[in-house]
Image: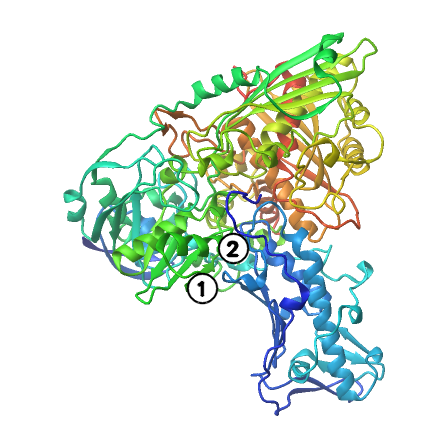
């Protein structure tokens, strides 16, 4: 999701701005003449130095090689493949002749903040046009060469053919098309979906072979500048500083070059500043780690030295039990709650979580004496990194170049620029290129955590067995609290992720929050507040269905009500629709009911299951994508939980890359299994108690679902993202299944059956 | 610092390192073989899995001084001339998402299949539960192992 704490603009690329021609190499030599089957020469290539580049994302050279820019970061969603595929399809390029190049930070590419599940949503229409524009230019160039009308020329798979069977290859045409004006939008035609070759079809990820052969280069592997290795010992209390330190033993370790202090920023720290601590710079990784171990440090105490997350969650639970600040209100909630026949009341508690991708945060930085800085890093938002490095180091923004490597997972951790800024800062201090590594315990102990959250819900059922009242209070420290001491309460956009956008047609509704200042760095983690809110709502609906004596899916469908587009803007002040206009991406109840009905059918919902097994359901729209989920669970008499089967139904509009959609749902279920069953960050005396995978547990192959079936709705709606949407409904579906299997209702994560 | 002789991917190597340097960092820093990854440093995540004399081991927890004259196989040494059936199966099933854990997963899977050409689900669980994947590619890992076992990938 996009942070609203920084003042960076979301850059929407306008077509005029990004379509521009580049100079051509001098023409001349015809290369690559091939005889066609009827002895007509096929002119396939031109001067190899010629380059056609009508926009910033696409270029073709005289050999026919097509280079496509991947400007969004690759952290496992496949976006480095999916968006180039869109361009390749519209321009009729042969994917086997495409080279994908990762973009550096540059505003000319538009928004590069790979976050919030919006890459395809934002760029699908624009990149289709970009590809279609190039296709048109190649056809126009061919038409001019042949002296025929462009309507007689058709681009097909890296060539343009005419009605007589003549063929020009893209390499040949690259040289010829350079002086053509960029076609007007009215002149280009997007492909009909019937003609898609790659969009909605199956294509393997671009880096597949490199990954399975160990050749893929991640941020952690990058060392282009012969950098020294740096590690930092940070105060366990984020933002607090160093009292004393003694480097004497550290500098004795062979290979250690320098030991120095970085000042701490205090709390809140912001998203850009290094946490501070003691830096060890060494010739190699082991020397750096040993040097760090040999440091003697006493830490200062800061404002959060007394933070105890277990106590705080209990406090927040009390706060959630009190009348709060109303953010959405319909009808008369207090009257309604006094007129119920049955009142279902529950508190739902969720702890802090850590993203902990397999590749820990890391960055290579080379600060140069001319006041420029080049970085190589696995970052989700290279433009923010560029601005942050410039800001913290006092450089001109255009002097900071961020090369984006492959990311070994992220889940939101690597959208915060601070670890890249650390590397740049150390490079400047040291006077040479630096490779900064975070160890796993750094990652777990010094992160930006998913906010812990206490929710209180009261749902009333009247004497006609209808749901007549819905009260939902969610209390949590906001993301903004990491940067702004005055941000003490859940913000509007955070509450619009699951609380304020609740779609159920209930007459009396009240959604509230209460203050809970941040006592540790809070960040956004894959699906953000939707995790907590879907857990509460999905569980509560299951409880309501049971109280009403009806099937949970029937209950949900009934409560959703008629087919309609919900006018949230009239219901919620400043309604946040994931940065999109409501008219472009309305809350469509028909689409929501459709995924629910689909998952019901595909999962064989209601089938007989043996004792100790159960099926649970939940559905949730997040990041504009509609998802319904059924989880099947087996719980043995030792309370060991196995998940033999998960069914998802997803409506994400046009399914641009279905194989990657399936993968995101398979992976999202496993990620949800970690959050529901295993993971918990606790803080005591200001310090995170966990430090590695022995005490911060995550799902392994034995914990994750055994099989996951993903049913993608066939749709022509504007595509929306799938990186985050799988997570929120999985957790309540799992917990509802556990209830069915054991009779134990889960209202706190991680699940502990006793 | 001391000098050590070992065999890495069938090549005789001599390196210089502190005796307690984990093999992981010798491979990555001394030899530039970055296919083997760091994930936790304490043998809990499997990202650093290599074969030592044919046995799958966590290289983050093997001191170089204990490996004199041993034969080490890393992901770079697998399928040098032709992709290994496990690598082919991995590609046929489109297993990787981010890819960071996959070297370790593949090394563990190869070791499993070398010892047990037709593993059951329980065998797969036991062999692979030491390898964490945060992207959650587990369903496809299992499918790829079974595919390689059936030799579909060859």
Dot 2 or dot 1, earlier in sequence: 2
Chain letter, disc 1 residue: A
* Residue B10 position within the rendered picture, expressed as x and y whole percent measured from the top left: 37, 60
Label 2's element? helix
Residue A230, placed above or below residue A673: below
Label 1's element? helix
To which residue does mark 2 refer? A212
* Residue A628 position within the rendered picture, expressed as x and y whole percent measured from the top left: 72, 34
- How packed mark 2 is, by other alpha carbons closer than 10 Å (few <14, some 14-19, many 20 or more), is many
Name the disc covering residue B56, or none: none
Q: Is residue A734 left or right of residue A451?
A: right
* Residue A526 position within the rendered picture, expressed as x and y whole percent measured from the top left: 56, 39
Of tags 2 and 1, which is closer to the observer?
A: 1
Question: How many numbered discs sit on the rendered protein?
Answer: 2
Distance between the Cα atoms at labels 2 and 1? 37 Å
- In the depicted view, which residue is nearer to us: A20 or B123? A20
Answer whether residue A173 is visible to the viewer in this image.
yes
Q: Residue at x 57, y 15 (%)?
A: A322
- How packed mark 1 is, by other alpha carbons closer than 10 Å (few <14, some 14-19, many 20 or more), is few
Both labels 2 and 1 in a single chain:
yes
* Quarter of the N terminus of chain A within the rendering: top right
Q: Is residue A457 left or right of residue A749?
A: right
To which residue does mark 1 refer? A398
Q: Residue at x 76, y 78 (%)?
A: A139
- In the depicted view, which residue is nearer to us: B39 or A242? A242
């Amino acid at each position: 999701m996009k942070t609203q704490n920084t003042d960076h603009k979301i850059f929407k690329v306008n077509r005029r701005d990004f379509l521009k021609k580049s100079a051509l190499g001098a023409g001349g030599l015809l290369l690559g003449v091939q005889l066609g089957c009827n002895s007509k020469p096929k002119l396939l290539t031109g001067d190899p130095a010629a380059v056609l580049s009508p926009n910033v994302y696409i270029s073709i050279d005289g050999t026919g090689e097509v280079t496509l820019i991947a400007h969004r970061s690759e952290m496992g969603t496949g976006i480095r493949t999916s968006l180039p595929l869109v361009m390749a399809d519209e321009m009729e390029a042969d994917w086997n002749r495409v080279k994908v190049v990762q973009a550096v930070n540059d505003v000319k590419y538009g928004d590069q903040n790979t976050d919030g599940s919006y890459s395809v949503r934002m760029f699908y229409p624009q990149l289709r046009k970009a590809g279609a524009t190039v296709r048109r230019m190649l056809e126009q160039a061919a038409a001019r060469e042949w002296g025929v009308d462009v309507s007689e020329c058709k681009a097909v798979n890296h060539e343009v053919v005419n009605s007589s069977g003549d063929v020009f290859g893209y390499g040949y045409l690259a040289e010829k098309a350079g002086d053509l004006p960029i076609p007007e939008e009215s002149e280009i035609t997007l492909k009909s979906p019937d003609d898609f070759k790659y969009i909605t079809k199956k294509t393997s990820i671009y880096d597949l072979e490199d990954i399975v052969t160990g050749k893929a280069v991640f941020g952690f592997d990058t060392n282009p500048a012969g950098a020294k290795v740096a590690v930092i010992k940070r105060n366990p209390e984020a933002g607090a500083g160093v009292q004393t330190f003694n480097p004497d033993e550290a500098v004795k370790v062979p290979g250690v070059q320098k030991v120095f202090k970085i000042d701490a920023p205090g709390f809140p720290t912001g998203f850009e500043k290094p946490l501070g601590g003691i830096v060890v710079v060494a010739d190699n990784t082991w020397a750096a780690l040993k040097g760090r171990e040999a440091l003697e440090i006493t830490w200062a105490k800061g404002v959060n030295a007394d933070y105890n997350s277990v106590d705080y969650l209990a406090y927040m639970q009390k706060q959630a039990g009190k009348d709060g600040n109303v953010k959405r209100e319909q009808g008369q909630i207090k009257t309604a709650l006094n007129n119920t026949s049955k009142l279902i009341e529950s508190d739902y508690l969720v702890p802090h979580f850590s993203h902990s991708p397999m590749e820990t945060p890391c960055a290579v930085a080379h600060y140069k004496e001319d006041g420029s800085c080049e970085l190589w890093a696995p970052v989700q938002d290279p433009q923010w990194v560029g601005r942050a490095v410039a800001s913290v180091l006092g450089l001109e923004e255009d002097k900071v170049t961020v090369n984006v490597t492959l990311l070994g997972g992220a889940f939101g951790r690597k959208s915060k620029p601070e670890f890249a800024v650390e590397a740049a800062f150390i490079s400047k201090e040291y006077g040479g290129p630096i490779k900064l590594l975070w160890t796993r315990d750094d990652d777990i102990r010094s992160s930006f955590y998913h906010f812990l959250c206490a929710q209180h819900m009261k749902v009333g059922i009247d004497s006609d067995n209808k749901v007549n009242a819905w009260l939902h209070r969610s209390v949590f420290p906001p993301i903004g609290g990491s940067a702004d001491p005055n941000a003490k309460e859940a913000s509007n956009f955070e509450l619009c992720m699951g609380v304020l956008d609740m779609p159920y047609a209930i007459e009396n509704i009240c959604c509230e929050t209460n203050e809970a200042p941040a006592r540790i760095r809070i960040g956004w983690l894959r699906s953000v507040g939707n995790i907590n809110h879907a857990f509460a709502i999905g569980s509560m609906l299951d409880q309501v269905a049971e109280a009403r004596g009806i099937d949970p899916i029937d209950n949900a469908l009934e409560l959703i009500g008629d087919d309609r587009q919900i006018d949230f803007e009239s219901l919620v002040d400043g309604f946040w629709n994931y940065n999109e206009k409501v008219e472009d991406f309305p809350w469509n109840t028909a689409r929501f009911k459709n995924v629910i009905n689909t998952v019901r059918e595909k999962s064989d919902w209601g089938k007989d299951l043996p004792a100790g097994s159960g099926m649970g359901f939940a559905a949730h729209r997040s990041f504009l994508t509609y998802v319904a989920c059924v989880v099947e669970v087996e719980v043995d008499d030792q309370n060991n939980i196995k998940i033999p089967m998960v069914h998802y139904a997803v409506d994400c509009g046009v399914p641009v890359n279905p194989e990657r959609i399936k993968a995101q749902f398979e992976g999202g279920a496993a990620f949800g299994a970690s959050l529901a069953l295993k993971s918990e960050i606790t803080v005591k005396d200001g310090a995170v108690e966990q430090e590695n995978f022995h005490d911060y547990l995550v799902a392994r192959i034995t914990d994750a679902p055994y099989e996951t079936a993903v049913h993608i709705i066939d749709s022509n709606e504007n595509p929306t993202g799938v990186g985050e949407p799988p997570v929120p409904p999985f957790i309540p579906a799992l917990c509802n299944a556990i209830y069915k299997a054991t009779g134990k209702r889960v209202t706190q994560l991680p699940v502990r059956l006793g | 610092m001391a000098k050590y002789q070992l065999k890495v991917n069938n090549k005789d190597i001599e390196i210089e390192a502190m005796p307690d340097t984990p093999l992981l960092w010798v491979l990555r820093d001394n030899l530039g073989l970055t296919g083997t990854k760091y994930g936790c440093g304490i043998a809990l995540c499997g990202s650093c899995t290599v074969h030592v004399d044919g046995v799958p081991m966590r290289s983050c927890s093997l001191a170089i001084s204990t490996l004199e004259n041993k034969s080490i196989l890393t992901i770079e040494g697998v399928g040098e001339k032709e992709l290994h059936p496990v690598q082919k199966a991995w590609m046929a099933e489109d297993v990787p998402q981010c890819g960071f854990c996959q070297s370790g997963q593949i090394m563990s899977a190869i070791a499993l299949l070398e010892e047990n050409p037709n593993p059951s689900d329980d065998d797969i669980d036991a062999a692979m539960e030491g390898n964490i994947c945060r992207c959650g590619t587990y369903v496809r890992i299992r499918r790829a192992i079974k595919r390689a076992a059936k030799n579909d990938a060859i």
